């Protein structure tokens, strides 16, 4: 997993834990083995889909949480990134994500976190990539409103899971086929399932395609 985090990013993560001591446990939750495995899988598959030397990508991440996926993309994406916008409905995530990605925030705002419900987000710049790793956290109506707002032609990355026992999950999928049916995504270029090594042993599903 070290290939997905630079030494500088590890220092910023450590500093984030020091700056937000009241959120230490919650921040550490985003570095659970299952969380990191799932995000590393996403980055690696996206590297296969987006060719090296392509145009700089404008990425919007929904369910961005504390910004760990943004860190991993900046550190290990094989394609150039113009900037990343990380969106989460929890207002406590924004300052933490900004601090964790401070190096890129200070570099001409290549990173910025925002607080918003995903289905109410207005794109300030046309995205080339839209990522949602929290499909299980919203009901189908909210998901559909969010999906309808994505501009046509955008590369879309979706992750969900079969972790039904988690009380925060309200829209899990029993298998990859059901996840595909729920997604509404056409032109799918990657569809896969990943059994995590986390204690719960849940399976993560992922789709990459074009809206």
Image: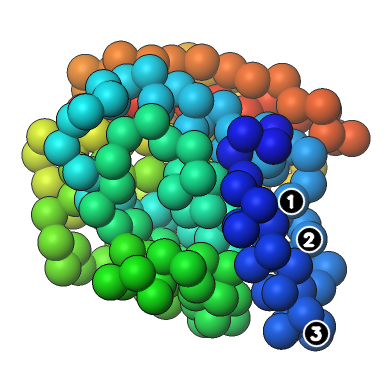
Q: To which quarter of the image does residue 183 belong?
A: top left
Q: Is residue 117 above or below residue 29?
A: below
Q: CA distance from mark 1 to mark 3?
A: 17 Å
Question: How many other residues sit within 10 Å of disc 3, few (<14), some (14-19) or many (≥20)?
Answer: few
**Image location (x, y in percent) of residue 161:** 61, 33
Q: Quadrant of the C terminus?
A: top left
Task: Give the SS element for disc 3.
Answer: helix
Direction from residue 159 to residue 105 in the image, left or right: left
Q: To which quarter of the image does residue 104 belong?
A: bottom left
Direction from residue 19 to residue 98 in the image, left or right: left
Q: Which residue corresponds to the image point at 61% horizontal and 57% vertical from the top-left?
A: 9
First reached walking from the N terminus: tag 1 or tag 3: 3
**Image location (x, y in percent) of residue 202:** 75, 29
Question: How many other residues sit within 10 Å of disc 2, few (<14), some (14-19) or many (≥20)?
Answer: few
Q: Quadrant of the N terminus?
A: top right
Residue at image mark 1:
31
Q: Which residue corresponds to the image point at 68% horizontal and 74% vertical from the top-left?
A: 16
The reply to whether residue 138 is visible in this rendering is no
Q: Are marks 2 and 1 in contact (CB under 8 Å)?
A: yes
First reached walking from the N terminus: tag 3 or tag 2: 3
Task: Give the SS element for disc 2.
Answer: helix
Q: CA distance from mark 3 to mark 2?
A: 12 Å
Q: Which residue corresponds to the image point at 50% horizontal and 45% vertical from the top-left?
A: 75
**Image location (x, y in percent) of residue 45:** 45, 22
Q: CA distance from mark 2 to mark 1?
A: 5 Å
Q: Is residue 118 above or below residue 151?
A: below
Label at residue 22: 3
Q: Which residue corresponds to the image point at 18% horizontal and 30% vertical from the top-left?
A: 54
Label at residue 28: 2
């Amino acid at each position: 997993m070290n290939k997905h985090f630079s030494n500088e990013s590890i220092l910023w993560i450590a500093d984030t834990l020091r700056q937000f001591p009241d959120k230490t446990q919650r921040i550490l939750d985003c570095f659970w083995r299952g969380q990191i495995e799932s995000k590393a899988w996403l980055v690696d598959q996206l590297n296969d889909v987006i060719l090296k030397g392509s145009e700089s990508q404008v990425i919007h991440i929904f369910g961005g949480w504390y910004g760990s996926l943004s860190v991993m993309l900046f550190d290990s994406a094989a394609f150039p990134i113009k900037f990343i916008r990380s969106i989460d409905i929890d207002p406590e995530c924004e300052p933490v994500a900004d601090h964790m990605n401070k190096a890129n925030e200070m570099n001409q705002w290549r990173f910025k976190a925002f607080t918003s419900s995903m289905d109410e987000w207005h794109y300030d710049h046309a995205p080339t990539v839209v990522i949602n790793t929290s499909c299980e956290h919203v009901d189908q109506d909210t998901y559909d409103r969010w999906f309808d707002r994505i501009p046509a032609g955008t590369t879309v990355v979706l992750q969900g899971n079969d972790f039904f026992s988690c009380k925060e999950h309200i829209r899990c999928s029993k298998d990859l086929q059901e996840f595909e049916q729920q997604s509404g995504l056409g032109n799918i270029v990657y569809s896969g399932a990943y059994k995590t090594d986390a204690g719960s042993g849940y399976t993560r599903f992922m789709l990459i395609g074009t809206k």
